[in-house]
């Protein structure tokens, strides 16, 4: 697929005018009046423009695009405003933590499905699709598993059997309820090599193909993804992913999608939208779906008007790249309010990474995303 510079240039120029306004100031929060509980549909919420149809999810519909958010289940249970906005603003949800192995099987052989089941019920009640995250990652694995491997109590043959069981149990439990699964997450490191994990050391690289095959056997209809960060543009890392996909396809492995996480920072600059689209297009040309799976744009604290406008640009480069790629089917933000952001806990003196501030007031990034969805041609 080819992307024309003229089309992207017109789009970007118009977006700057519409998304920033005359002053570039942060806009007031939309009126929030809906009330809903976990597993129950939301009442109508009024968004900017005076209509429920102005939500991000509704605006994206004409692009055949789902707009999603990662969901903090503690916030969903305790914060009515958070719950209302999750239900009314988005058309897809991703479990921030409760579908990871450490959360699902904290003790060997004992599953804790409850929180993940609650999210699935909430999504169904509100007409949202569920992106499953994640079947296999080198982080947030059960302590019993990591300690067993490190001590030598779990040997390679048993480890492979445990991985197979985990994938079959998890995918079968959510069969017919999950739209996509991130099957293997962050499997290539920043030096463009397969990540050095105990999975690679104990099982060899075949664990990647095995994981996809097992997931497909457990639910033949669910779409299966590779997912990683720092894969927005064409680099050695994305070249490695491109070769990995081709290798898997040659082995007839059922890989269906490529997830671009999109964790960005204002201090590092951004790939231009055309470059993002170019990279997405080459994976689409392999027959894959594309999704932006974890978008956020952090900044050094405190905030100021320049950082906030830069943040708006960062979100827009990802969204424009997605819209310029016909096979890009989802744009998900990794949380939508700074009140519950993961960023301050992981990056010292950084934060304010989301579309809304701690009080659920819209930031320039939110208006920029809305303007992009309003301006872009239906795909």
Image (spheres, rainbow, N blue to C red):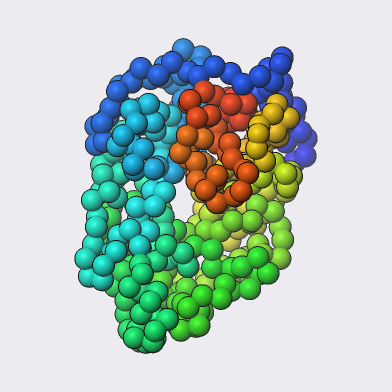
| Up-down relation of residue 331 to residue 305 (above or below) | below
Residue at position x 45%, y 83% in the image: 203
The answer to which quarter of the image holds residue 376 is top right
Instruction: Tell whether 63 sits left or right of 154.
Output: right
Residue at position x 23%, y 62% in the image: 111
Instruction: Tell whether 351 sits left or right of 77.
Output: right
Residue at position x 51%, y 75% in the image: 197
| Up-down relation of residue 200 to residue 312 (above or below) | below
Instruction: Tell whether 224 sits left or right of 115.
Output: right
Q: Quadrant of the C terminus?
A: top right
- Residue 64 in view in this figure: no
List x then y, in percent, for residue 106: 29, 64
Residue at position x 39%, y 81% in the image: 149
Nearer the observer, 69 or 151: 151
List x then y, in percent, for residue 237: 66, 64
- Residue 194 in view in this figure: yes
The answer to which quarter of the image holds residue 6 is top right
The answer to which quarter of the image holds residue 23 is top right
List x then y, in percent, for residue 310: 71, 34
List x then y, in percent, for residue 296: 57, 42
Label total for image: 0
């Amino acid at each position: 697929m080819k992307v024309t510079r003229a089309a992207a240039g017109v789009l970007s120029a118009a977006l700057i005018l519409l998304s920033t306004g005359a002053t570039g100031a942060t806009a007031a929060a939309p009126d929030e009046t809906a009330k809903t509980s976990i597993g129950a549909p939301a009442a109508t919420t009024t968004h900017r423009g005076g209509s429920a149809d102005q939500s991000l999810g509704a605006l994206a519909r004409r692009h055949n695009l789902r707009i999603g958010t990662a969901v903090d289940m503690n916030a969903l249970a305790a914060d009515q405003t958070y719950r209302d906005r999750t239900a009314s603003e988005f058309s897809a949800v991703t479990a921030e933590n409760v579908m990871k192995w450490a959360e699902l099987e904290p003790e060997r052989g004992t599953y804790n499905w409850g929180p993940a089941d609650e999210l699935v019920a909430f999504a169904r009640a509100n007409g949202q699709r569920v992106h499953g995250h994640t079947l296999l990652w080198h982080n947030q694995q059960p302590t019993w598993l990591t300690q067993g491997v490190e001590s030598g109590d779990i040997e390679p043959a048993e480890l492979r059997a445990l991985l197979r069981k985990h994938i079959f149990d998890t995918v079968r439990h959510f069969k017919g309820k999950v739209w996509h699964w991130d099957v293997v997450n962050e499997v290539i490191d920043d030096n463009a090599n397969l990540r050095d994990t105990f999975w690679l050391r104990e099982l060899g690289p075949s664990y990647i193909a095995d994981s996809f095959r097992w997931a497909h056997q457990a639910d033949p209809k669910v779409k299966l993804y590779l997912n990683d960060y720092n894969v927005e543009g064409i680099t050695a890392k994305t070249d490695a992913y491109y070769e990995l996909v081709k290798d898997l396809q040659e082995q007839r492995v059922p890989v269906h999608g490529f997830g671009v996480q999109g964790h960005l920072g204002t201090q590092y600059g951004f790939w231009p939208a055309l470059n993002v689209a170019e990279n997405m297009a080459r994976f689409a040309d392999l027959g894959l779906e594309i999704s932006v799976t974890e978008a956020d744009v952090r900044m050094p604290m405190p905030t100021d008007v320049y950082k906030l406008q830069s943040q708006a640009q960062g979100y827009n480069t990802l969204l424009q790249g997605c819209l310029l790629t016909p096979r890009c089917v989802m744009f998900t933000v990794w949380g939508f309010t700074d009140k519950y952001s993961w960023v301050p806990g992981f990056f010292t003196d950084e934060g304010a990474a989301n579309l809304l501030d701690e009080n659920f007031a819209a930031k320039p990034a939110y208006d920029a995303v809305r303007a992009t969805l309003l301006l872009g041609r239906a795909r």
